[in-house]
Amino acid sequence: MILGASGTIGSAIFRRLSQEKTLRVAGTCFSARQKESPDLIRFSLEADILPLLRQVRPDVIVSALRGDFGKQLAVHEAAANYVFAHSGKMIFLSTVNVFDGSLEKPHYESDARIAHSDYGRFKLQCEDLLWDRLGRQAAVLRLPFVWGKNSPRMEAVRAGCSAGELEVYDIQCNHAADLQIAELVEWIIREDKSGTFHVGTSDIVGYEPFMERLIAAMGEKKPRFVRGEAAGVMAVLNSRTDIPHKLLDWDSERLIQYLCMP
Ligand SMILES: NC(=O)c1ccc[n+]([C@@H]2O[C@H](COP(=O)([O-])OP(=O)(O)OC[C@H]3O[C@@H](n4cnc5c(N)ncnc54)[C@H](OP(=O)(O)O)[C@@H]3O)[C@@H](O)[C@H]2O)c1
């Protein structure tokens, strides 16, 4: 069951898992019209999630939610309790921001987390909740900037090209494709894996040169870049040796090709 299946990443995971004939996939949406699938169930963070879990009876819960931090935390707590009681698995989408208090280098799975932002601290709290309640029944994916062909980031680049001006970050970073995340989630479920997974392109690139290459590949004229403050390195790199090479074989060039493919 995918919580947040109408979102950028949740919908990619929903599509990918739905292709797998042996799986029964359910997902939630909140405000979206149910364009992905009529199977999406309306769910609000305001509601108690337990009746929904009792109705769907999932073996695996993937959390791809956004929304109020306190309410998300309560939903994750209830979902983790359900998973624990039913010997299931919970897969949580975390972020590079759990390291945003330490921007001098890229980070690997076992690095100490130092979060500076509210968002980073909230994700760190969710990670801890899952480790405490679920241990080996949990998988945490830490993600850098995530892109899909029609994701809000791509829409912002298209809009910036039309307007002639685009905001860029002054950072070194890596990126992830929605498809790469979805493929990894499928593998984690199939192989019953747990622990922390850093997902993203293998190369660390400047955000601005990455945007230049992406915009050139899109066949658009480069807009004027408006640069924010320098912020160091925001990248998560993989050091696990158990993941099949084909799931890790993404660099920024492959990502750009993927985003520009029809
Ligand atoms: N995108 C990135 O670059 C990135 C990077 C690192 C980590 N992450 C993490 O990955 C997860 C998914 O990100 P995303 O970019 O795919 O997010 P998204 O596109 O904004 O999707 C969020 C999902 O949460 C649902 N939702 C929002 N408010 C809700 C509420 N009040 N009650 C119930 N459901 C609600 C949305 O439903 P509706 O669309 O139907 O309203 C949607 O399905 C998040 O946890 C995010 O922190 C994302």
Image (cartoon, rainbow, N blue to C red):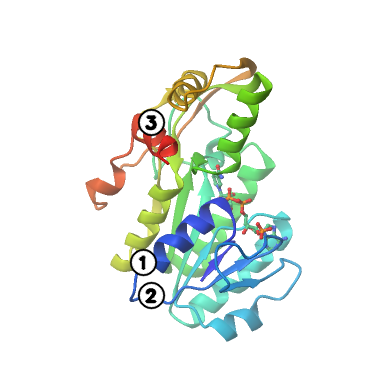
Residues at marks 3 and 1, CA–CA distance in whole angstroms? 26 Å
| Residue plotted at (34% across, 74% down) | 21
* Other-residue count near label 1 (Cα within 10 Å), few / some / many at <14 / 14–19 / ≥20: some
Q: Where is residue 35 in the image (x, y as percent from the top left)?
A: 60, 62
> Could you say which quadrant of the image residue 18 lies in?
bottom left
* Residue type beneath disc 1: Ile
| Residue of label 2 | 23
Q: Where is residue 150 in the image (x, y as percent from the top left)?
A: 54, 44
Q: Quadrant of the C terminus?
A: top left
The answer to whether the residues at label 2 and label 1 have Cβ atoms under 8 Å apart is yes
Nearest the eye: 189 or 111: 189
> Could you say which quadrant of the image residue 77 lies in?
bottom right
* Residue type beneath disc 2: Leu
| Residue plotted at (53% across, 37% down) | 99
Q: Position of residue 198 (x, y in %)?
A: 40, 45
Under tag 3, what secondary structure?
helix
The answer to whether the residues at label 3 and label 2 have Cβ atoms under 8 Å apart is no
Q: Where is residue 188 in the image (x, y as percent from the top left)?
A: 35, 61
| Residue of label 1 | 189
Residues at marks 2 and 1, CA–CA distance in whole angstroms? 10 Å
Under tag 2, what secondary structure?
loop
Q: Which callout, 3 or 1, points at the residue further toward the start of the chain? A: 1
Q: In this view, does 116 lie to the left or right of 10?
A: right
> Could you say which quadrant of the image residue 37 lies in?
bottom right
| Residue of label 3 | 252
